[in-house]
Image: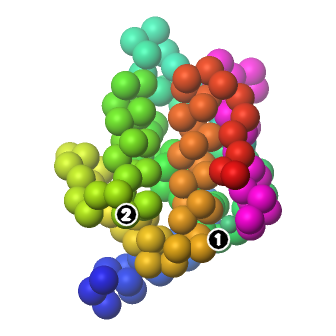
Amino acid sequence: MLDDLKELYQEVILDHSKHPRNFGKITPCSHQGHGYNPLCGDTINVYLELDEHECVSNITFDGKGCAISTASASMMTDVIKGKKMNDANTLFENFRKLATGECEEIDAGEDTERLMVLAGVKQFPMRVKCATLPWHAMHTALIGETEISTE
Ligand code: ZN
């Protein structure tokens, strides 16, 4: 990875972990997902609201996580808010592939750069599950399951 990208990655992660966006709970909410990563102890809850067009009108998260999982959740809620349910699921698949190294590049339109930065976590293999945890929680919320463990 280029040094520039590494630096950008660290800056973005630090910023989002210190100042998480969309932190909190939506009550009541139509969809909710819970994720737990026993390797690190991260617990993330994702809350979301779909409007009548199956568009994510609001999405928040709470829980206790490390800097990586918190930053990932924060960036994810930014990216997913306003997206159609189908597009949110596609973004989840794209990000998962990027972060696990299954593919090197994705085309996610305007969100490509943000996802690429976040997927920089693959340079720290131990942290990949931290980064993908909130995405799994969001995905389980959308497909109507409630719980996910990365193990
Ligand atoms: Zn973690």
Q: Could you tell me which secondary element the residue under label 2 belongs to?
A: loop
Q: Which mark is residue 101?
A: 2
Q: Which mark is residue 92?
A: none
Is 7 on the left or on the right of 50, as rendered? left
Residue receiving disc 1: 67
Q: Residue 146's spot in the image, x, y percent?
A: 71, 29
**48 or 90: which is nearer to us?**
90
Question: Is residue 130 placed above or below 22 in the rendered structure?
Answer: below
Q: Which quadrant, please, contains the N terminus?
A: bottom left
The answer to whether residue 71 shows anywhere in this view is no
The answer to whether residue 76 shows anywhere in this view is yes
**127 or 64: which is nearer to us?**
127
The residues tagged by marks 2 and 1 sit, at their Cα atoms, a distance apart of 21 Å
Q: Quadrant of ligand 1?
A: bottom right
Q: Is mark 1 within 8 Å of ligand 1?
A: yes
Residue 29 included in the magenta stretch of the image: yes
Please report the bounds of the magenta region as a residue range. 22-43
> Neighbour class for label 1 at 10 Å: few (<14), some, many (≥20)?
some
Q: Earlier in the sequence, mark 2 or mark 1?
A: 1
Q: Residue 11's spot in the image, x, y percent?
A: 46, 79
Residue 28 included in the magenta stretch of the image: yes
Q: Residue 59's spot in the image, x, y percent?
A: 57, 36
Q: Tell me what residue is drawn at x 43 percent, y 61 percent.
A: 99
Q: Tell me what residue is drawn at x 74 percent, y 50 percent.
A: 36
Identified by mark 2, the residue type is: Gly
Dividing the picture into quadrants, the one containing residue 60 is top right
Q: Could you tell me which secondary element the residue under label 1 belongs to?
A: helix
Q: Residue 106's spot in the image, x, y percent?
A: 24, 53
> Neighbour class for label 2 at 10 Å: few (<14), some, many (≥20)?
some
